């Protein structure tokens, strides 16, 4: 979980700060500091004073391997076992450490070589290559812009359950009806219904703008 969290924060902010890691993992900054020391000792992260931590080459390769097993497990759970959209993430967190690379390859082949998980996030290949995405945060859109939901990078069960009640899944078309100034909420239309979203929630939904 640490390596995946650091990868996501580094991709978003250039580095992962202790406070941000603690917030995502819902643990104390002191616990994060202790674990980072262990990871640094293993050569998986490099810490820079006042900047945060970054994954080393070895740490990045391990993070991508975990992402691959996790997202393939999510796909298997949903497509074959029909596990709930939100629950699939929680179950995959338990399975990702038990799936071997050989089994991961078998899952990928059985599922027809999927490119994304059920939440729209790209699945790294067996060589650790993560396909790039061209999507951007919903919070970047302005009034009147239309878009298609492409991925939910923040796969927290709470957010996934909330979005499922709104019908906001990858592939769903949405429209920004109103964006309040000064970091206010956004009013987003999904189908025939409109919902207010905080910028925090909107920043965790990635979309592709429609021209």
Image (spheres, rainbow, N blue to C red):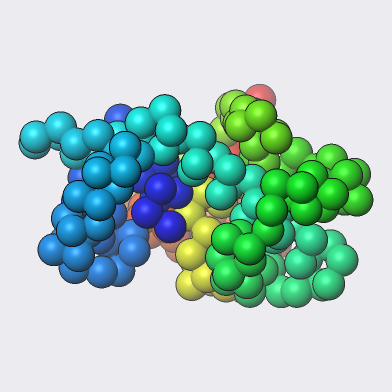
Residue 211, horizontal then vertical, whole percent: 66, 25
* Residue depicted at x 35% and y 31%: 56
* Residue depicted at x 84% and y 40%: 113
Left or right of 51 on screen, residue 118: right
Nearer to me, 183 or 16: 16
Residue 20, horizontal then vertical, whole percent: 25, 52
* Residue depicted at x 31% and y 37%: 43
Residue 161, horizontal then vertical, whole percent: 57, 72
Looking at this view, name the residue that lies furthest to the left.
50
Count of numbered labels shown in the rendering: 0
Nearer to me, 120 or 126: 126
Nearer to me, 47 or 75: 47
Residue 169, horizontal then vertical, whole percent: 67, 57
Seen in the picture, residue 167 relative to 117 is either above or below; the reply is below
Residue 69 visible, this orientation: yes
* Residue depicted at x 82% and y 52%: 107
Nearer to me, 122 or 100: 100
Left or right of 77 on screen, residue 169: left
Seen in the picture, residue 196 relative to 52 is either above or below; the reply is below
Where, quadrant-wise, is the N terminus in this rendering?
A: bottom left
Left or right of 51 on screen, residue 124: right
Residue 141 visible, this orientation: no
């Amino acid at each position: 979980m640490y390596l995946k969290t650091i990868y996501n924060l580094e991709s978003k902010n250039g580095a992962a700060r202790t406070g941000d890691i603690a917030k995502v993992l819902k643990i104390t900054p002191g616990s994060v500091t202790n674990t980072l020391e262990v990871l640094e000792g293993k050569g998986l992260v490099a810490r820079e004073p006042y900047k945060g931590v970054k994954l080393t080459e070895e740490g990045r390769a391990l993070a991508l391997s975990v992402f691959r097993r996790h997202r393939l497990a999510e796909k298997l759970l949903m497509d074959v076992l029909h596990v709930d959209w939100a629950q699939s993430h929680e179950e995959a967190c338990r399975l990702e450490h038990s799936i071997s690379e050989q089994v991961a390859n078998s899952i990928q082949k059985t599922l027809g070589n999927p490119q994304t998980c059920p939440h729209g996030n790209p699945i790294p290949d067996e060589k650790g290559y993560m396909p790039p995405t061209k999507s951007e945060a919903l919070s970047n859109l302005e009034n009147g812009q239309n878009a298609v939901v492409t991925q939910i990078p923040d796969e927290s069960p709470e957010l996934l359950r909330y979005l499922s009640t709104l019908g906001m899944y990858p592939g769903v078309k949405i429209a920004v009806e109103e964006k309040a100034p000064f970091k206010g909420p956004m009013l987003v239309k999904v189908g025939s219904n409109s919902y207010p979203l905080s910028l925090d929630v909107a920043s965790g939904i990635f979309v592709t703008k429609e021209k």
